[in-house]
Image (tube, coloured by chain):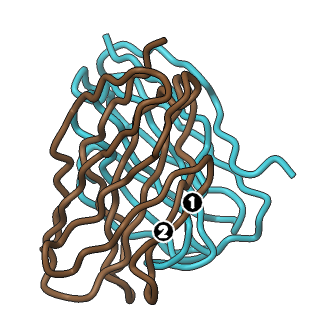
Amino acid sequence: AQSVTQLDSQVPVFEEAPVELRCNYSSSVSVYLFWYVQYPNQGLQLLLKYLSGSTLVKGINGFEAEFNKSQTSFHLRKPSVHISDTAEYFCAVSSGGSQGNLIFGKGTKLSVKP
Amino acid sequence: NAGVTQTPKFRVLKTGQSMTLLCAQDMNHEYMYWYRQDPGMGLRLIHYSVGEGTTAKGEVPDGYNVSRLKKQNFLLGLESAAPSQTSVYFCASSFGLSSNEQFFGPGTRLTVL
């Protein structure tokens, strides 16, 4: 069975500082990996996804993530955050095929302070 | 292009009452999903559908039923609401499974007293 662990439930950071949100997954098969963002009182929207190929994936709003198969990780990074990045971020994994539903982590709340 | 819409946005029920949540998408997606979101729990899949007329159970299906009579609509029903079903419910749709992006609605906040 697959699972996703987001190692930090809350991450406070000052504006213009770099940030890394950590995600580890467990799966016995090849996976697809996703990061979604949820702004307050809204639904989720896709930030980026890894399907295959280059392990460094760039997404919207200046975010990027690196797939590390040996460490089963997919950490999300941004070199300089803005107040508007304050949101909850969810890592998700899918194994593909007919049973390829998304399994979500419990989320990391990013708070950007001025 | 409205994307994924959900009706209603908010609802308060008493224990034992029933209700139906409506999800509609205008992207011609085959796949649709119902999730619930609880604090500190992330999103958990309730039921999903891989096409018109088909539904399947997700991780937490007990106490819920679904129907997909039309491709664009996916209904979630609570026959006898319980306080444990107090949650925020999200509908999503996608073109395919696994590698495809899921598009989410704005959510329905349900409180069961």
> What crowding class fits label 1: few (fewer than 14 Cα within 10 Å), some (14-19), or many (20 or more)?
some
Quadrant location of residue A99?
Answer: bottom left
Residue pictured at 29% horizontal, 64% vertical: A74
Q: What colour denotes chain B? A: cyan
Q: Is residue B70 above or below residue A107?
A: below
- Chain shown brown: that is A
Numbered tag placed on residue A59 in the rendering: 1
Residue B36: horizontal and vertical position, in percent?
A: 36, 41
Residue A63 appears at what percent x and percent y?
Answer: 51, 52
Residue B70: x, y in percent? 70, 65
Residue closest to the far right = B1
Q: Which residue is mark 2?
A: A49
Q: Earlier in the sequence, mark 2 or mark 1?
A: 2
Q: Is residue A33 left or right of residue A3?
A: right
Left or right relative to A18: residue B94:
right
What whole-number distance in Å separates the C-alpha atoms at marks 2 and 1? 8 Å
Instruction: Tell me the amino acid under the disc marked 1.
Output: Gly
The residue located at (39%, 17%) in the rendering is B111
